[in-house]
């Protein structure tokens, strides 16, 4: 069984979020994709404006290395200072997984 580590990042952007937020977010995605164990990064936006970002790594150790990355740590502080009204982070280990694909 795959033992992925998935970070769920729920957030709400401030009304006055600067345009460069989106550039920084793209840079962070690109950096994460280059790290060992990266699997995927997806962002969903709900009708009420809440955002859900899912970042998946193949192991908890690789997720922890991404979390501790200096650029990522600096961006976390920027997020608190300049981007977000609120956020909630949960890091989860896959306990069970079922897949189905239409052939």
Image: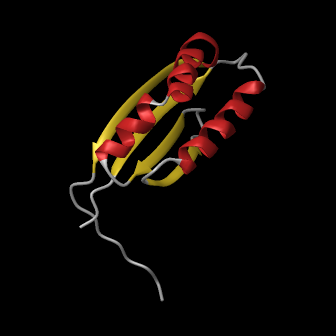
Q: Say which of 57 and 80 sits in front.
A: 57
Res 15 quadrant in image: top right
Against 94, residue 77 (above or below) is above
User: Which residue is situated farthest in the bottom direction here?
Assistant: 103
The answer to whether residue 75 is left or right of residue 23 is left
> Residue 8 appears at what percent x and percent y?
41, 39
Residue, far top: 81
The reply, left or right, for residue 13 in relation to residue 20 is: left
Which residue is rendered at x = 76% and y = 26% of the image?
20
Question: How many numbered discs?
Answer: 0
- Give the vertical position of 29 relative to 89 (above or below): below
Residue 35 percent coordinates (x, y): 50, 47
The x, y position of residue 77, in whole percent, is: 53, 15
Q: In this figure, which colouring scheme has been used for the structure?
A: secondary structure
Relative to 49, 62 lies left or right:
left
Q: What residue lies at 54% left-to-right and 14% top-to-bottom?
A: 80
The residue shown at (63%, 45%) is 30
Q: Residue 71 is drawn in which quadrant?
A: top right
- What residue is drawn where x is 40% and y is 37%? 65
Residue 55 in the image: x percent, y percent?
46, 45
| Quadrant showing the N terminus | bottom left
Q: Residue furthest right?
A: 19
């Amino acid at each position: 069984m795959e033992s992925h580590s998935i970070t769920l990042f729920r957030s709400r952007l401030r009304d006055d979020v600067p345009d460069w937020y989106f550039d920084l977010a793209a840079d962070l995605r690109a950096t994460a994709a280059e790290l060992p164990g990266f699997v995927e990064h997806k962002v969903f936006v709900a009708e009420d404006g809440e955002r859900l970002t899912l970042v998946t790594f193949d192991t908890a150790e690789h997720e922890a290395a991404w979390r501790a990355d200096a650029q990522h740590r600096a961006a976390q502080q920027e997020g608190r200072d300049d981007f977000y009204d609120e956020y909630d982070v949960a890091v989860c280990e896959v306990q069970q997984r079922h897949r189905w694909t239409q052939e």
